[in-house]
Image (cartoon, helix red, strand yellow):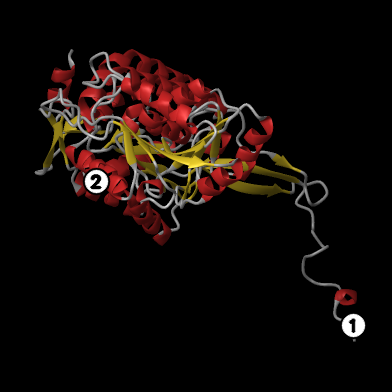
Amino acid sequence: MTAKSEFERLSGKIFINGEYRSSSASDVLNVIDPATEDVIGQIPDTTKTEVDEAIAIANKVQKEWNKVNGLTRAELMHEVAANMRQLRGIVGEMTTREMGKPYKETTDEVDWSASALDYYAEIGRHENGKVLGPAVDDQFHFTIKEPMGVVVIILPFNYPFCLFCWEAAAAIAAGNAVILKPSENTSLSSLKFMEAFEPFPDGLVQCLPGGAKVGSRLVESTETHMVAFTGGVPTGQIVARACAEQFKPCLIEASGNDPFIVMPSAPVDMAARGATFGAYLNCGQVCTSAERLFVHEDVHDEFVAKMVANVSALRIGNGLDKVDIGPMVTSKERDRYEAVLQRAMEQGAKVAHGGGRPAEFNKGWFVEPTVLTHVTPDMDIMNNESFGPVAPICKVSSLDEAIRLANDSVYGLGANIYTTDLTEAMRAVNEIEVGMVWVNAPLLDNDAGPFGGRKMTGMGRQLGAEGLDTFRHTKLAMIDPGAKAQDFWWFPYKDEEAFPE
């Protein structure tokens, strides 16, 4: 089995009711390796009939899955996690060939995905509600947790497996069925990833590739019950509006423009290394990338010099080679990103490193990792998600200024600060208007900690106990075992309780 043979086998397929099936779609989309520009496969634009069939199957199997006890669910989820680890090599290679990031990153992602399955396998059976103090003598009041039903998950290309598993693991542990609409740029590897879910009942997890029409059909169906979307703000707003028409719950993670603050007390070497990783991981195509660097004037020049030295040493190339940075995902994305850089330079930013395309590549959507200086807060690059390998550095004179500028954004996903001053660290944690703050620990995730943001970043949380409750309803139950009369408020009302004459 090779990546090439798997691309051929899975081209034109959908994953429905536990099996790979050739789609009847007449429209197909080419899958292009961003490092070589070779066509490596095709994906179908799943038809309406196929979408409707998948939804019907999901509804049927979900009702049966909801009856399965928590221990059995957990055992099956651990089996799925083990399968993921067995698939890490082939899935990692296929993903690198589909979307470009280094093999180390794609295989790491499979490991993170398995970790999420193991985590939710156990936390999913820790509690299913709670007992309340009753409001009436001799009664029993309690809550129970119930699944949403059929959950639609719509994802981008940058983290096709861990983003899926953060949501799908919680949803499945809660008793839901899941339908994935993967990115067009990672559909074949996502189809391969479906093999890991073999221990589950057929139809509990399904995968329907295609374009926007497929996502719209899944979202707008009255037979799906929740949508989890990760992507850009405009599409996230479309999804949220469609869900609002039915009062359908939705989880939206729509964009970030994260600040990265460096204070004089920070170890500058380590801050520069952290910023290099934070800005250029996955070629900068990360929602929590370090996109706005606010560096204190006392260490600005030293930081820039160390940053440039670090970035100069990064190895660029095909993600299957010994490299740190691969290509951008598509030529369209590279064109968009280069326009962002050009606009920054037009507005006065200076290129300290990079700014172009690597000369050694005749093919592939490669760009140089770029460091910009003389950046001011009013520039477009500081007010929009760049989603590419660039670190715009803005000089600040105080922590007050850094926090004010950090909060001057329509987004509120995450924030980073490098400091050894505990007071500065706690001010950042308490005052920056985001969902997550990393102090000297950029971009870390924790299965047990909630992931999500504020403002135009979206709404809802993945991971942690909050992530489990995202995919559950809460039902209140009140029981009077003795079926006693409740004369304190039943009819007939007592005359002495009427309005006095």
Q: Amino acid at mark 1?
A: Pro
Mark in the foreground, 2 or 1 = 2
Provide the secondary structure element on which disc 2 rests. Answer: helix
Q: Name the residue tied to disc 1.
A: 500
From this viewpoint, is residue 252 visible? yes
Q: Name the residue tied to disc 2.
A: 339
**Vertical arrangement, residue 481 with respect to residue 115, above or below:** below
Judging depth in this view, the residue of 137 and 215 nearest the camera is 215
Q: Position of residue 358 (x, y in %)?
A: 19, 27
Local crowd at mark 2 within 10 Å, few (<14), some, or many (≥20)? few
Provide the secondary structure element on which disc 1 rests. Answer: loop
Q: Amino acid at mark 2?
A: Ala
| Residue under the point 28% across and 17% down | 323
| Residue under the point 43% across and 53% down | 248
Are the residues at dot 2 and dot 1 in contact (C-beta closer than 8 Å)?
Answer: no
Q: Position of residue 474 (x, y in %)?
A: 58, 46
> How many marks can you see?
2
Residue 440, by quadrant, is: top right
| Residue under the point 40% across and 19% down | 111
From this viewpoint, is residue 254 visible? no
Judging depth in this view, the residue of 306 and 184 nearest the camera is 306
Q: Position of residue 79 (x, y in %)?
A: 42, 17
Residue 25, by quadrant, is: top left
Q: Position of residue 93 (x, y in %)?
A: 24, 18
User: What is the spatial separation of the Cα atoms under label 2 and label 1, in whole angstroms?
Assistant: 77 Å
Location of the N terminus by quadrant is top left
Local crowd at mark 1 within 10 Å, few (<14), some, or many (≥20)? few
Location of the C terminus by quadrant is bottom right
Of pointers 2 and 1, the one earlier in the residue sequence: 2
Judging depth in this view, the residue of 481 and 411 nearest the camera is 411
| Residue under the point 60% across and 28% down | 265
- Judge from the rendering whether residue 396 lies leftward or rightward of residue 89; answer left or right: right
